[in-house]
Structure formats: C-alpha cells, structure tokens
Amino acid sequence: MRNRFLCIATILCLLASCHGNQSERRSSVEQEFSSTGSDGCQTVERRFSDGSLESRGQLCNGERNGHWREFYADGSLKWEGDYNMGYRELPEVDSVGLSCVVTFDDTLGFILNRQRQCRIQVAPLNPKDLIIYVNQGPIDTARTGELYDFTLMPVKSADLCIEVLYRHKPKPSICKHCYPVRAH
C-alpha cells in the first residue's frame, strides 16, 4: 500500500513539474485585448517579450474563432488560417506539390551528438498539422526557442533524413530531405 502511494505521489509530482515547464515557456508571450465587438468577441494580439507580434485573431467565449495569423519571433509568418470556436479548420490540400522549406539555426551542418534547431514550413499548413519522421536520433519540440519548431540530434554518422507528412492525409509524404552527418 505504501509503495502504491509513493508511486502515485511521484507521478503527480512529475505531472506538476511538466505543467510548470510548459507555463514557463509561454511566459515570454504577453496577451493584449485590443477591442471587443458587438458580438462579444475580442480581437487579441499576443506579443513576444521584445514586443514583436506572436499572433493576432479573435476570441469568442474564450475560444479562438475566425482568421488568425501566427508569427515567429523574427517576424516571419509561421501560419495563417481559420478557427471555428476553438478548432483549427483544416485546409483541403493534396500533399503532392506543396512547398516544403526546412531552415536551420546555423550553417554548420549536422554534427554527431550535437543538437540543431530547425523550422519546417509547409504553406498553408500549421506546424501542429505536420508529422515529422527522422531516421535517427530524437526529435524534440519541447525545448525549441521562439524561432524554430524542432530540435534534432543525430546519433549515427549516417545521413540524417527528415520526412514531412500532413497529419490528416499522410500519404504521400510532402517532402523528404537528407543531410550528411559529420563526426566533429
């Protein structure tokens, strides 16, 4: 019985610490309510700590609604699309012919056992609607900054390949890029 209690207490502590980290990551974004319309909906602008725009759209009854735009901290467009009472409307797209742009945080290339951040953009899709497969090493979304979506770390000297799929229509893939990995 005591072991069961300790196990449950440990799990609760872990969950609480994970939740705390998430709110710490979001603390760099401040929310402003610009105006309230006759329908009770509010135009909202969220800003990064440096004052640059993070997102802009409407909240109705506390839910995202209507047209929204999201930006990276450098000002470039991350995603633009529509919400319907809190649910992101998914565009009807054919994954063939979509433009897939992969941008990295530096020009050094991949080095064995070193993390590298990347941004993957597929207009008109939200990064949350992408499935990213990497043939080696972990892919992490939790520790990225405000400029990148993913952190990658190769664990073998073989080429690192990134394959991007649309979560709601996964076949065929949108793109596949392979990069050499250096030992140092």
Image (cartoon, grey):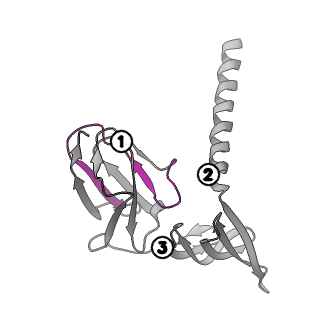
Q: Bin the neighbour count of mark 1 within 10 Å (Cα to Cα): few under 14, some 14-19, many 20 and up.
A: few
Which residue was labeled with disc 3? 76
Where residue 128 sits: x, y (%)?
Answer: 48, 60
- Point 39% across, 45% down: residue: 115
Q: Is residue 100 left or right of residue 150?
A: left
Q: Residue furthest top?
A: 2
Asked if residue 146 is among those painted magenta in the image, a careful observer would answer: yes
- Residues shaded magenta: 142-165
Where residue 98 sits: x, y (%)?
Answer: 31, 73
The alpha-carbon separation of the residues under discs 2 and 3 comes to 20 Å
Q: Bin the neighbour count of mark 2 within 10 Å (Cα to Cα): few under 14, some 14-19, many 20 and up.
A: some
Which residue was labeled with disc 2? 25
Which residue was labeled with disc 1? 114
Residue type, label 2 = Arg
Residue type, label 3 = Ser
- Point 23% across, 53% down: residue: 179
Labels 3 and 1: the sequence-earlier one: 3
